[in-house]
Amino acid sequence: MRYAGLLAVLLTNLSLAAAPELPSTIRLSNGEWPPFTSAQLPHGGGLSRIVSEAFANEGFTVRYEWYPWKRALEIAKVVSVEGTAGWTLSPERQRDFLHSDPITQVRVVFFKRSSFQFDWTGKEQLTRYKIGITHGYNYGDAYLDLLARQALKPEVDYTDEANLTSLAAGRLDLFLVTPEVGLYLANRLNLHGLDYAKTPLTAGSSVHLLVSRRHPQARSLLEHFNRGLAKLKVAGKIDAYLQEASITPTHADPSKVGSEPTVKTP
């Protein structure tokens, strides 16, 4: 019995020694999605700040590595970094990644020229409109339903900036984007006379931290992050950080772009 007890202790110690420890600095891939995330903004943007502070509540520091979004996801998948920040969920992503608790909610709206008469009821065919989307983005179930019904034929570009510029120039009728991103970029690009349809395509999609299922400490990372995030929520800091980054609450509805500066520029 004594030897059995010693063996159990030895095996436990070996197991603990074999389990890799989490690094004190968490490396996360990130991309340009201002004002939520950007290498050019204080704290890396409002969403990046929340992620950093959530880990800080658990004793970790965060270092962001900035890539195009597709590359950011790929290097997180193969565990070249600990995880990646700021993603909505899709079946493909959930196949490869575990995800955190929701960090915030985002909407997807139809940006348009102010002179262009359009509102979205959720029923009409959209094939007569030139609708821009950005390559690699997840626009949610409502968008996928439109594609499945052949009610929409999107025109793809590689950046939100390119799509907004095409919209302002009349090359597009509509552009799918979150209102905060559309407002921010339109002001930064000095594009006037744009607004968006009041009824969103997607009323609210949750945004998460993703960690590859291949990561040996994936669950531990997410447990730490979720605990730190919960502390931020209790302290009321999540809304405060978003508002400081000029990210409007989802119940607010800023109307015009290019009149008063609804968002700050870097």
Image (spheres, rainbow, N blue to C red):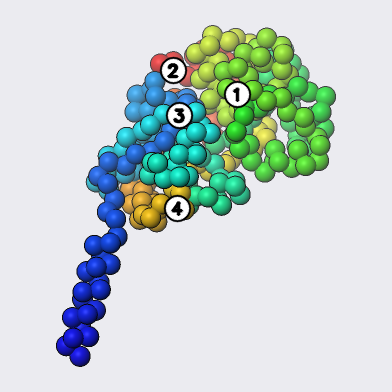
- Residue depicted at x 58% and y 10%: 191
- Residue depicted at x 53% and y 50%: 96
Is residue 196 found left or right of 96 in the rendered image? right
- Give the mark nearest the N terminus, 2 or 4: 4
Instruction: Tell me the amino acid under the disc marked 1.
Output: Tyr
Q: Position of residue 244 (x, y in %)?
A: 38, 27
The answer for how far apart the CA atoms under marks 2 and 4 are is 39 Å
92 vs 202, nearest the viewer:
92
220 vs 175, nearest the viewer:
220
The quarter of the image holding the C terminus is: top left
Tag shown at residue 264: 2
Q: Do the residues labelled 2 and 1 touch (CB within 8 Å)?
A: no
Instruction: Tell me the amino acid under the disc marked 2.
Output: Lys
The answer for how far apart the CA atoms under marks 2 and 1 are is 24 Å
Instruction: Tell me the amino acid under the disc marked 4.
Output: Arg
Q: Are marks 2 and 3 in contact (CB under 8 Å)?
A: no
- Residue depicted at x 77% and y 42%: 148
Q: In which quarter of the image is residue 107?
A: top right
